[in-house]
Amino acid sequence: MFNLTEHELQNKMAGFTAQEINQQPEVWKETVTTLFENKESMRGFIESIFSKHDHVRVLLTGAGTSAFAGDILVPELQKQYQGNVQFEAIATTDIVSNPSHYLFKDIPTILVSFARSGNSPESVAAVQLAGSIISDFYQVVITCNPHGELAKSTEQDANSLTILTPEQAHDQGFAMTSSFTSMMLACYGLFTVYPFTGDNVSKVIANGGKLVNQLTPIVEDILQFDIKRIVYLGSGLLSQLSHEAALKMLELTAGKVVAVHESSLGFRHGPKSILNDDTIVVLFMSQNPHTRRYDLDMLKELSGEDSKMKIVAVTEKTDSEIEEYADWVIPVNSDSEQLTNDFYLGLLYIMFAQVLALKMSIKLGITPDNPSPDGRVNRVVQGVTIYEYNHA
């Protein structure tokens, strides 16, 4: 797996993380099966709320990677609805520290919590705050842990829905990988107004299965370059995906690789100052023709830099123009048909970032399953004090 023997995986404490990256296509398949089997009851729960109120806020929330899941989904879901349903992504860390900025008594709200463990202090507190402040409050908990506090909070509650990911998505490694992608897929399947069919998702799953086997030699070639800094760029929801990609590198290398993210257009407005000879830039290319023009312009601009920096273009399908300007091109869709949106592409794009971070961690002599053995950061956040909120 990823050109590592079982002995190497155990010796380098990489076994959990490697397996959890590798298993994603299978986990997606199981996630979709669960959604199909419970489609009527799950969708019925959502539709009953929408029909009951003239306007509904849907707040996608979580902390860290779980917060980024909402950031990625909101642009696509809001584009699909454009009506009396308003999608927003607000981290639990913001809700807990500033409830009055985000929770409004008289606006019917569905709080969608993404939670690997369901035990993070901010996640539990955000639900409690929302329930105490909002008059018409509903919640959807998308979690990997049936025994977590969030899952327990929905028991016997007619205004709540819990969606459990497959058991193996409850990552044992430090970094969220299969938990992240499976929870996003579950949320998309729950809310999308487009046909969520086996045909659409099966293309993503099939390509994921191929990609996970194809990435290792490419990543190993990229790692011949001595990376000190990495920049992830993208547009729209792929800009939000770049946040998660950068975090994976930062987490798994224990901060030894400087990892930043930005939008393709936003990069020129100051953040481009980070570039030097030890930098690699990864550009997540949109499949939207209009958006792709801006990504391509940035690719050309980076290629023209007087620097030894390197460029990776991750794209749905390659073409001669991209190959001309990028040092490495990674196409993720080997099917003849195009995927329908950038969200589906994002599920495949992030696999590259996960594998790159895993292999870089091992190269630096860090243990990916526990990159912070000194306890500076923890798999489930510790050290958080939740203070009582005065509604007055």
Image (cartoon, rainbow, N blue to C red):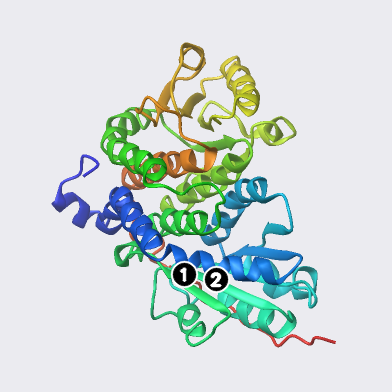
Quarter the C terminus occupies: bottom right
Q: Nearer the viewer, residue 112 or 302?
A: 112
Residue 313 x, y percent position in the rendering: 48, 26
Q: Is residue 72 left or right of residue 183?
A: right
Q: Is residue 345 found left or right of 32 in the rendered image?
A: right
Q: Nearer the viewer, residue 347 or 197?
A: 197
Residue 122, percent from left and from top: 59, 75
> Where's residue 111, x and y in %?
62, 70
Q: Amino acid at mark 1?
A: Ser
Q: CA distance from mark 2 to mark 1?
A: 6 Å
Instruction: Determine whether 232 is above or below 382 in the image.
Output: above
Q: In this orientation, which residue lies closer to the viewer: 377 or 316? A: 316
Circle 1 is placed at which residue position? 41
* Residue at image point 35% right, 28% down: 335
Question: Residue at label 2?
Answer: 45
Disc 2 residue type?
A: Phe
Q: Contact, CB < 8 Å: mark 2 with mark 1?
A: yes
Q: Secondary structure at mark 2?
A: helix
